[in-house]
Amino acid sequence: RGDALSNDNTFLFAWAKQNPGYTVGVKNFGDQDVIAPAVRKDAPELLNWLNNEIQTLGKDGRLKQAYEKTLLPVYGDSVSESDIVVEYK
């Protein structure tokens, strides 16, 4: 068997789950990068709205609900929610 490298743990976790006999040995390495929306510099109202909306979705549990509906069925108990989702509180 060989070693492997992935630049996105979400893909790596799913691949390992779908391929018996493979495991993820290192769940985090280096700085954490997140997938995030981008807003033009000249749109501060949109930026403020988006930041507030992300905080609201985290506080009211909708980010957790989205994880449970879309990602939990893929990863099951092989990965914890905190390995994938950044919780906004």
Image (tube, grey):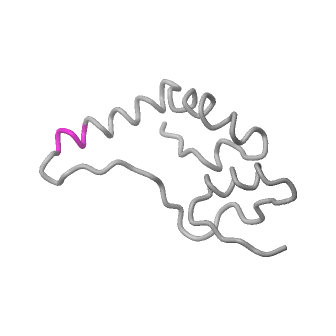
- The residue that appears at 53% across and 41% down in the rendered structure is 87
Q: Quadrant of residue 6?
A: bottom right
Question: Looking at this rendering, what residue extends furthest in the top direction?
Answer: 60
Question: Which image quadrant for residue 52?
Answer: top left
Q: Judge left or right: residue 3 versus residue 42.
A: right
The quarter of the displayed image where residue 7 is located:
bottom right
Q: Which residue appears farthest toward the right when viewing the image?
A: 21
Which residue is farthest left? Answer: 42
Note whether 81 is above or below 3 in the view shown. above
**Magenta region includes residue 46:** yes
Quick check: 59 left or right of 15?
A: left
Along the viewing direction, whichever of 19 and 43 lies nearer the viewer: 19
Magenta-colored segment: predominant secondary structure: helix
**What residue appears at the point 76 percent right and 49 percent down from the top-left corner?**
18
- Relative to the observer, which residue lies in front, 88 or 70? 70
Q: At which x and y percent is residue 1? A: 85, 73
Q: Which residues are magenta?
A: 44-48
Q: From the top left corner, tell me how far across and down residue 84 is, in percent.
A: 61, 48
